[in-house]
Image (cartoon, rainbow, N blue to C red):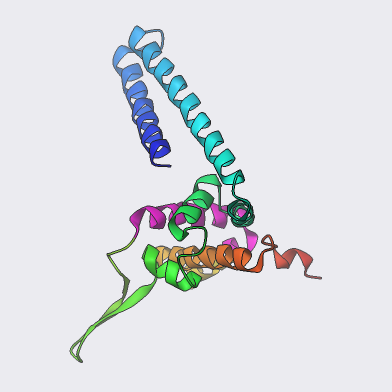
Amino acid sequence: MSLREQLVKQATSLKCLEKGMKVLVGHEDDVSVEMIRETLHHLEKQILKIEKSMDSLIKTDEPMHKNYRLSRSVKGVGRVMAIQFLIHTHNYTRFVSWRQFSSYCGLVPFPYQSGTSINGRMKTHPVSDRKMKSLLSMSAISAIQHDKQLKCYYQKRVEEGKPKMLVLNIIRNKLVARIFATVNRGTPYVELNQFAA
């Protein structure tokens, strides 16, 4: 996973370099642009190769493969997110509940107070796993777009005047809860509103 992250970073920086080079040179037939494209093509092949090897590695362990498939059934959870969950939770054995994992990711707001004089609004703790928090943010945005229930919830809370980041944090927590629920229950996530009469 670490190697994949490094290759993705390199590919992203090369894409930016390619755009800049096209503007600088003024056409796409330059040698430098072609070299960048070749390197990008090679990096993309390497990323695919790593992803295939990760998939085959997960399939060697049946409980891990089952948990991976269950977590992927939740809308907004892709391959990278599902694998990161397996890594960070040690295949869902490291944390007792989804609330503990949310706290670990820095999604749980804590009271900001000291005695009786200082009493500020609740804030998430700065000491957290920033990578997971960032991935959960991307998953929450994806879930808002593809899950009707979460989309309605998000729009309703924003219309009520709640800050967008606060609502996004609630949705991140909902995603963590859904993933842990599917794994603990042992059945894929099902949208209940589709069965409503």
Observer-nearest of 91 and 73: 91
Q: Is residue 179 visible?
A: yes
**Where's the C terminus, which quadrant?**
bottom right
Q: Magenta stretch: dominant SS?
A: helix
In this rendering, position of residue 84 left or right of residue 193: left
In this rendering, position of residue 192 left or right of residue 106: right
**Residue at 52% of width from left, 40% of height from top?**
54
**Residue at 39% of width from left, 39% of height from top?**
5
Where residue 166 sits in the image (x, y, percent)?
41, 68
Task: Find the residue positioned furthest to the bottom.
Answer: 116
**Residue at 24% of width from left, 83% of height from top?**
113
Q: Quadrant of residue 13?
A: top left
Where residue 192 sits in the image (x, y, percent)?
72, 67
**Residue at 43% of width from left, 71% of height from top?**
100
Q: 84 above or below 177?
A: above
Q: 46 above or below 74?
A: above
Q: Quadrant of residue 60?
A: top right
**Where's the N terminus, which quadrant?**
top left
In this rendering, position of residue 7 left or right of residue 172: left
Q: Which residues are magenta?
A: 129-151
Where residue 14 sits in the image (x, y, percent)?
35, 26
Q: Does 185 lie within the magenta span? A: no
Q: Is residue 162 visible?
A: no
Observer-nearest of 152 and 101: 101
Task: Find the residue positioned furthest to the right.
Answer: 197
Q: Does 142 lie within the magenta span? A: yes
In this rendering, position of residue 124 left or right of residue 61: left
Observer-nearest of 141 and 92: 92
Disc count in the image? Answer: 0
Observer-nearest of 172 and 10: 10
